[in-house]
Amino acid sequence: MLPAEMVPAVLDAAPDAIIVIDKTGTIVFANRQVCALFGYTPEELVGSNIDSLLPERLRSGHLAHRRRYGAHAQVRPMGIGLDLLARRRDGSEFPVEISLGPIGTDANLLIAAAIRDVTDRRQVQAELQQAREAADSANLTKSRFLATASHDLRQPLQTLALLNGAMRRSSPGPIIGEALAQQELAIGAMTRLLNALLDISKLESGATKPEITDFPLASVLSELQAEFAELAAAKGIELEIDSCEDRVRSDPSLLGQILRNLLSNAIKFTREGRVLLRCIPELTRIRLDVLDTGIGIPPEDLPHIFEEFYQVGVPANASRQGYGLGLSIVRRLVDLLGLKIDIRSELGGGTGFSLVLPRGASSLETSGPETHLTPTIPQRGDVRRGVLLVEDDPAVRRATQLLLKVAGYDTISASTRQEALEHAQRRPDLDLVVADYHLAAGETGLQVIDALRQALNRSIKAVLITGDTSSAVQLVAHDSRMRIASKPINADAFLTLLEELLTA
């Protein structure tokens, strides 16, 4: 047991300022740190009232707090949830944290207080808060820039894609046809690079927000089967995607983006054999494996494959099949969704990626994969469909009109909501509206579609085309008579979308 005469020496050696008061608030003991912290000598402190160490404006309230504590004394922090301030001898104030503890009995109660100057901590907290606010502001600015840049960069690509489609349908000669085919490939490459760069920028800025839900894997896997079957067949390799009726909990759109990048890579680097997307149910989770019989990855390259612009075995100045962005996007999406991805590979023996997902609620009804009608492009002699095109960019508007005319649609165009409404009054028998999402003067395609539906007193079918990848478009409520397409959409996909909607 510590001898009583050593107690003051021990308290003086404590790292915090320690002060002891009686029930009247009189200081009966102050250790060395109290004197250093407040600027008083021990003789000046002992016998004075504790209120002398508080700012004057706080002293009246402190008396009531002290009395309440004396009635229910216990070890606890002082002023929970409050910013406490103390006053030095020179009148300067500083923030403190105080812990209280009772000594003795109710009849002879003393209160010990450990006092800590938290000026440095508060300053660090304030700087962190300012840094967070600056980062949030920068991310918001970047998100706005990305939404604008996404729209503006996609507009010329959209024009090129539609003009290319119109020219290919105008019976060009063999030389012009070959030139247009090469042009289409170049437009596709530009589109993929732009999409990858914007995807990474959105992920870096925090503009991509996951929407977690329970959904059947079949809905994603069936889309992937339809999307990649032709690509795999063109290379002469087998593509096998397991059927899986289990439900998982994740973001279906972002999960689809992960699997698309993995499948695209697997097909690209497999010369012969097969690519398999395997679904393995486990007790509380579902494991997805993307396996290929491709060229494999050297061990020294494995740590780098998720880096931007890194491609295995491709020198910096060599011709590229891609841009080395797909796996970087995969890694960022996996992190965003709180998942884990594993890779195993053998040089010359193929590569496998494994992604583990939590199971979704099994009590919900499982919806089957969507069925798609086989689209047909209207031919001469078919009933000409009336289409109202609403687009404020003159180049995109003219290119879209030309493509629709070549494809056999009866098209009228407008650049504003008012023009669209005037056309609808003259042509109430319109079959379809095609509208850009962002229009001039702050108008949106959604506003135009809603106004036309009210004016025509019917839910006219509509296609909303957008280059905006912000969350505003992701939150659009879909209905069975509306489709959303992202710019740039090539001519074939655009016409297929129109015909699917018109024949649905």
Image (spheres, rainbow, N blue to C red):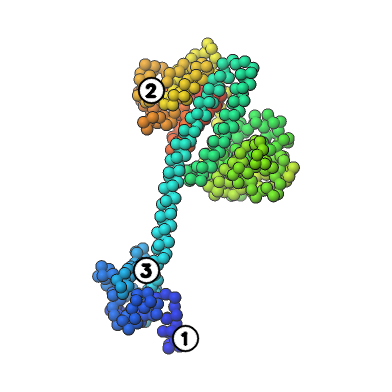
Task: Check disc 2 and give the amino acid type.
Answer: Ala
Specify whether residue 323 is in view.
yes
Residue at 65 percent of width and 39 percent of height? 317
Question: What residue is shown with label 2?
Answer: 420
Residue extending farthest to the right is 348
Q: Is residue 136 above or below residue 195?
A: below
Q: Nearer the viewer, residue 248 or 21?
A: 21
Where disc 3 sits, the SS reads strand
Task: Check disc 1 and give the amino acid type.
Answer: Leu
Tag 1: Cα neighbours inside 10 Å, few (<14), some, or many (≥20)?
few
Q: Quadrant of residue 33?
A: bottom left
Tell me if 65 is positioned left or right of 338 in this view: left
Per the model, the C-alpha gap separating discs 1 and 3 is: 30 Å
Q: Nearer the viewer, residue 139 or 387?
A: 139
Task: Check disc 3 and give the amino acid type.
Answer: Val
Per the model, the C-alpha gap separating discs 3 and 2 is: 66 Å
Who comes first in sequence, dot 1 or dot 2? Answer: 1
Residue at 52 percent of width and 39 percent of height? 198
> Which percent across, then down, holds residue 353?
65, 45
Residue at 56 percent of width and 16 percent of height? 170
What is the number of the mark on residue 2?
1
Q: Is residue 96 above or below residue 25?
A: above
Tell me if 184 is positioned left or right of 232 in this view: left
Q: Nearer the viewer, residue 393 or 57?
A: 393
Tag 3: Cα neighbours inside 10 Å, few (<14), some, or many (≥20)?
some
Where disc 1 sits, the SS reads loop
